[in-house]
Image (spheres, helix red, strand yellow):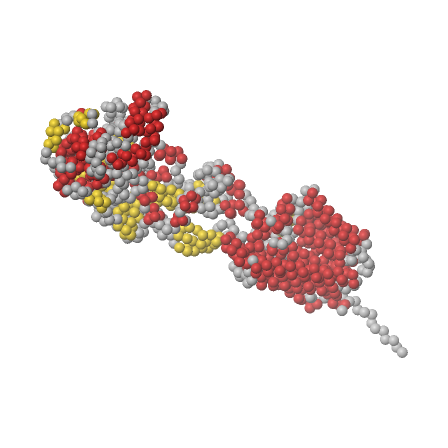
Amino acid sequence: MTDRTHARLLILAVLVMSLVVTLAARAFSLQVAGADQARAAASDNRERALVLPATRGLVLDQLGRPLATNRIALDVSVARRELRRLDDAEAVLGRLAALLRIDPATLAARLENCGTPRARPQPDCWNGAPGADPVVARDIGVERAGVILAAPADYPAVTVLESAVRHYPGGTRAAHVLGHVGRVTAEDLAARADLDGIATIGRAGLEEQYDAELRGRPGLERVVVDSAGHRQSGGVVEPAEPGQTLVTTIDLSLQAVLEEQLEAAVTRARGRVDPVTRRPYEADGAAAVVLDVRTGAVLAMASAPTFDANVWTGGISSADYAALTDAAAGQPLLNRPLQAALPPASSFKVVSTAAALQAGWSPTDAYDCPSRYRTGGRWFRNYESRAHGSITLARSLEVSCDTVYYRLADQLWQADGGSDPVEEPRELVASTAADFGFGAATGIDLPGERAGRVPSRAAKRALWQERRDDWCRRADTGYPEIADAERARYLRQLAQEQCVDGMRWRVGDALNAAIGQGDTAATVLQVAVAYAAVANGGTRWRPHLARALLDADGSVVRSVEPQALGTLDVPAEDLAFLRRALRGVIEDGTARGAFAGFPVDAVPIAGKTGTAEVFGKQSTSWFASFAPADDPRYAVVMMVEQGGTGAFTSGRSVRQVYEAIFGVRDGVADPARSVLVGGDVADGPPVLGPDGVPRVPGGAGSERGAGP
Amino acid sequence: MTVLRTAPPVPARVAPPPLRAWDWPLVLAAASLAVLGAALVWSATAAELAAAGRWQGSYGLRHAVNLVLGLALCWAVSRLGHRAIRRTTPVLYGASLVGLLLVLSPMGSTVNGAQAWIRLPAGFSIQPSELAKVSVIVAVALVLADRDPREAPDLRTLGRALAIAAVPAGLVLLQPDLGTVLVIGAIVAGMLALAGVRAQHLLVLAAAAAAAVAAAFLLGMVDQYQVDRLTAFARPEEGARTFGYNTQQARIAIGAGGVLGQGLGQGSQTQGGFVPFNHTDFVFSVAGEELGFVGVCVLLGLLAVVLWRGLLIALRARDLFGRLVASGVVLWVALQSFENIGMNLGIMPVTGVPLPFVSYGGSSMFAVWIGIGLLLNVHAGATADD
């Protein structure tokens, strides 16, 4: 053998062995020095934290009948990481798009996180947690889900998920009270840490108010997956905690009656021609509420126009949303009993009457009720310009005589110094109104309540300071955008007066305020709370919808106790006087016609009509009441915007509500026929069975109106 | 005085060498690698087979069966005489050429972009390029040894050797399987250097090879697929859809093994199927993850024993042919192992070459045991004369 090959072979041996050493050195650097990093990468590969959604709590009526429940929807999600690994990702997306009947480009767009440069606007982008698998279609139905599940090989990286979606079995029933839920968006997650892992949150109504209780706590599961994202093993780290069940004070049957009657009032108004505008009443919005005067519990609350609460499920379409917020359609989303503040007109006269008694007017003396009243160089007309002669305060409430209250307001205005006010004016009407709860939110457990307004010297000055610049500008420029020349001229004149003199509390302001007109604005709920206080002897209860919160096993987590907002600063005998006078309204006053044939001897009703004049609009119909007048239990208030007179439009419907509550048929009241099971409000929260389903007692009225 | 004449020498070998003349450390190390391979293949494929409703050990067992068949081939080759080898070589060489041609015909089937397989009935398939490696080694050795060993090979010899290597290499390039072409080229280059080819000739050859590679790229003879695959190791973070994913996942698997490994059948990367081809080209990643640095050292140690025994056989070879064949086989195992493991460790480009003895695949197993058989044959020739 030659030395030549021998030497070269030795070189080869060195080279070969150095290759092995090189590999060993590289393995050392990866496995010993870089092990931690690699292990982190490996666990990131295979471990996924899965959120176990919590079942949202039910919302029940006072007897346990369901108002809001859950149903299972089938959603489609795409695992982006796995999709990118596929060689035929485009084909997979194409198949999926065809199945879902959407454009493949739209489907691809839904895989992009919202807000990233390539993302399309919502809803065609992923608005959930940026790292989560995007849900590209919701509630696809069993058939299409079956296609995916039957052929997993055709749909790699595609998963069908079950999700619980909110369902409102009653559709429009109590839609405003219940509100709705919405998807948690990326913005929500950025703003609120407590929403981690939460899919839906309440966006309105009770769903929003009691969201923290209803939504429960999501659980966590750690899952080991393979390279295709398929689950290999896993364990629940923390089980989901279902949301609590909200038992409301709503009585589903009574709610149905109230909604029916509110709709009837709207229809009744629309069938009548307004003598002022010579057009049928628009009746473009209406509200009603039934309170338990002893507790402030809201037994029923209705708002018109209404909508199907289920339109929100699975995300609302933009067309639906536009329709729900359209002013021309009457803004159906507005929960009018607490979100529409309007002049309460004569229903406000309980306040003025209490103020009159406070001011020393006698409940027995007679006061003049002319057809018009002159003060400050102007005539102020009585309603429909009727004169009633010399009448008592009670009678002036019964016939709703404005001029009696004009005189009262004029006297009080003068006593406060007139247009040159004293140091600390009493403002008796305004302070009595505040005492009755006007001008402040009642604090009901619903979001978005409006406070309304009580006009006063101070309030007017504040308002003027706020609006002066605008008025003065308008005094200068006029209202060129208004086509009606006369109206534009009137508005300009008003602006000129307000610019110069708007801070001054004039006698006309005082007169308007005393009959619940002018700047006075109140919600149906405020009026109901005030009437309930008159009814129950002077306690203003906080109106509330929650009765109790129950655990999944039915045990009471929290029971809502009635909460007093305050006590009326009105002597007991004055309240008794008011109750008698309001009873007279029904039996021998403005609401006599509406209650003709009602068994008032068995069930005396106390009430007050109101027909408010609103500038540029048709009059607002009000009816505020409670019953039985001698032992009050329920307060019922109804209001119809541009609805005509209080008695005709609202009064008749309220009468029907009382007939349902007291089981009146053919002029005879029978508690056994009451729409309320047992003729009364339930004593305690409903009992849930071991399956979490409430045991609903049957009753005479339970079938009535409970259906859609 | 009587001159006692000694009897004429008995021919060195009339009977084939007995098994005890085998280089047992070599055989045992190589067989251990194959047994280790069977365990790794089993682990890599168990989950997927179970998911497909098949027995989870079927690939591992087949690997073991391949080992037994390989050992039989090895035994047979080790018994061949010098002349038998000379006679068999053209047949082997011709067979591999036919195989390589068949692969390019409609009979061939494509796996991962390279048309490298002939599918046979009953789910079997053979890869003629593996056989081509052995036949090139023996044929080149025959050509280079057919001269006076004291002199450097002349240009004619050099040309013949190159031509013998170029034909199969060209056919493999058409598949295209660049990895195998590079391995064949490197083996032949090493053998030429060992055979004493002059340094200036080697330099010219290197320049020509570089020019050929450049031409192949420029003339578009190499698919973009091949280029991407070759260069992916330099861009490890490029992401999922490219070949960077393979090497990235393999490196994660190996690194996650740490010192002691996660235990056979316990590696999450392996069992979760995160490393594609981890029973064939990426089988080393299974060793890395599940057996750890310790297991890797055992594997590299066994490989070192095989290479060391092969080098010893080459050094002790009685003739130039034996020495060239032995060093050719050593070069083959060394280069292919380095390329394969280096690819797993992310220091070599991704080319589809298997890890000898360990990667699943019958053709590779049989070819490499034929190589061991050739080493044993050379070993027997050397020891018989000692």
Image quarter for residue A415? top left
A176 lies left or right of A6? left
B159 lies left or right of A222? right
In the foreground, A434 or B73 = A434
Residue B264 location, x and y as percent?
54, 61
| Most distant residue in the bottom direction | B1
Residue shown at the point (64%, 46%) measured from the top left = B227
Residue B248 location, x and y as percent?
57, 52
Residue A591 location, x and y as percent?
17, 32
* Quarter of the figure with the C terminus of chain B: bottom right
In the foreground, B17 or A178 = A178
| Image vertical order of residue A476 relative to residue B246, above or below | above
Residue shown at the point (46%, 47%) measured from the top left = A132
* Quarter of the figure with the N terminus of chain B: bottom right
Residue A701 location, x and y as percent?
21, 41
B333 lies left or right of A570? right
